[in-house]
Amino acid sequence: MNFKAPRGTHDLWAAQAEKISFLEEVSRRIFRRYNIAEIRVPSFEDAGLFTRSIGETTDIVEKEMYVFEDRKGRKLALRPEGTASVVRACIEHQLIQNLPVAKLFYMGSMFRYERPQAGRYREFFQVGAEYFGNAAPTADAEIILLARDILTGVGLGDIRVHINSLGCAACRPVFRAALTEYFAKQQDLCGDCQRRIERNPLRLLDCKVDGPRFTDVPRMCDSLCPECATHFNRVQEFLTAAGASFQIDHRLVRGLDYYTRTIFEIRSAGLGAQDTLAAGGRYDNLVKELGGSPTPAVGFALGSERVVMAADNLGRLKLEVRPTVFIAVAGAELEPEAVKLAAALRNRAATVSGIDPAADLQVEGPYADKSLKSQLRLADKVGAARTIIFGADEFKRGTVTVRDMKTQQQEEVPITSFTA
Ligand code: HAM
C-alpha cells in the first residue's frame, strides 16, 4: 500500500517549511509592536460555532467544512478560519473584560474542502489577529496597517489594499433591497446566483460567473447611513495619514457573513487567480451573536502559503544563511574529542577562526562510521564553510586540521585554539 498526502494537503520541508516559519517570526515581531498577545485555540470546534458565525449561505459552510461526529456523537468541524474560535474563547474566558486591551493573534492550520490549485489548499496556514472592544475607525486602520506591515516585513512592497464598507444593520437592508431589485431584472443568472438572490444578494457581486456583467450595479457607498459614511471616511483619512495607499472596491463583499462596516483585502500584483494575500474587516455583531455582551471587533488573516509564494516569486524571501562547520574524524578513538568540540561550538563555548563569532553556527558531524573521504564529500554537500578534521597523527600532537572548504587551504591548529 502506497500512502500519499490527502488531496489538497501538502508536506513542507527544509527551505519551504523555513519560509513559513520566517513569515511567522516576522509576524510575531510585528504583533509585539502593536501590543497584540498570542492565543492558541483548538483545531476543531462545535460545528455550530462556524455555521452561526460564518453564515449558513456562505461557500465555506455550504460546501467546504470538514464536519464529523466524534465517538459520542458530537457534531464537530475542523476550523475553516480562526475568528469564530477566538471570539468563542474570548466569551468563554471573559478575555475582553479581563485583558487590559483585547488584541489577540494566532497562527495555524485551517481546513476548507476547496478545489485545490496553486495557492489554494484544503489545509493551509493562516496568521491572523483580532482586536476587540474598539469601535473607533482608528482600530480598522490599525488592523489594515498591521496586515500591510507584515506583508512589507517579508519583502512584499507591491501590494494593493482594497477596501469597502458593508454598512450596518440600519443601512445594509437598504442596499440589499436595491441589489435585489437590480438582480431581479437580470436574465439567465447562474445557479449559485439564483440560489443566493433572496438570502444573500451581496454575494452575487463577487460571483465569478456573472459578476463581470453587473456593470451598473448599485454601490454600497451610496446607501451608507451618515454614521457608517463618516466611519468609512475616517478610516480612509487615517490610512492616508499613515502613508498607506488603498483603493475603494465597490464590489468587495467577502465570503463570510459576519462583517459590518469596513472590509478589506490585500492583493499581490505577482500572483495569478489566488492573489488575495490577506483579508479581514470589522464584525461588530459577532460577539453578541455568539452569546457575549455587545463588543465591537475588527481583525484580519493572511494565507501563509500565498504570502510566501508571492515573496518567493519576487525573489524577496531571503532566508538567513548560517555558516556551517563540519567535524570529521579519522577513527573511532577520536570521537569523544570530536563530539566535545561539536558540543562546545553548538553551545557557543567555542569559535572557529575566520568565522564571525556572533553568527549562529550550524555544526554537522562527526560521522565516525564513514570514511574520511566520504565525510569530506558530505561536508561539501552541506555547504560547510570550514571542516575541522581530527586525524590520528595530529591528535597526538594536540592539533587538528581546519580546512577552508572554498579555497581548499588547510591549516594545522592546536585543539585548544577553539576554546581560547
Ligand atoms: P478569508 O478571506 O476566508 O478570511 O481568509 C483569509 C486568507 O486566508 C485569504 O486571503 C487567503 O490568503 C487565505 N486562504 C483562504 N482560503 C485558502 C485556501 N483554501 N488555501 C490557501 N489560502 C487560503 C478569514 O479567514 C477571516 N477569518 C479573516 C478575518 C479575521 N476577518 C476578521 N478577522
Image: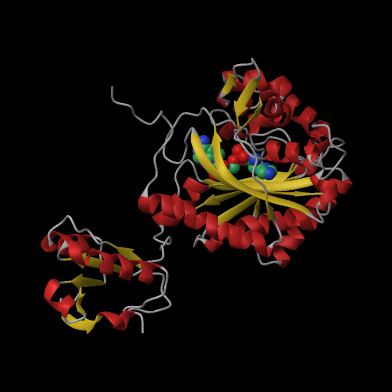
Q: Is residue 257 left or right of residue 368?
A: right
Residue 234 lies, in percent from the top left, at: 80, 57
Quadrant (top left/top right/bottom left/bottom right) for the C terminus:
bottom left
Q: Is residue 334 above or below residue 87?
A: below
Regarding residue 247, the answer to whether it shows in the image is yes
Q: Nearer the viewer, residue 313 or 102?
A: 102
Regarding residue 407, the answer to whether it shows in the image is no
Q: Nearer the viewer, residue 387 or 18?
A: 387
Residue 212 lies, in percent from the top left, at: 56, 34
Q: Is residue 170 above or below residue 126?
A: above
Residue 237 lies, in percent from the top left, at: 76, 61
For the point 83% across and 50% down, the residue is 98
Q: Is residue 399 above or below residue 10?
A: below
Q: Is residue 335 above or below residue 75?
A: below
Residue 242 lies, in percent from the top left, at: 70, 66
Q: Is residue 213 left or right of residue 222?
A: left
Quadrant of residue 290 within the rendered picture:
top right
Q: Nearer the viewer, residue 66 or 392?
A: 392
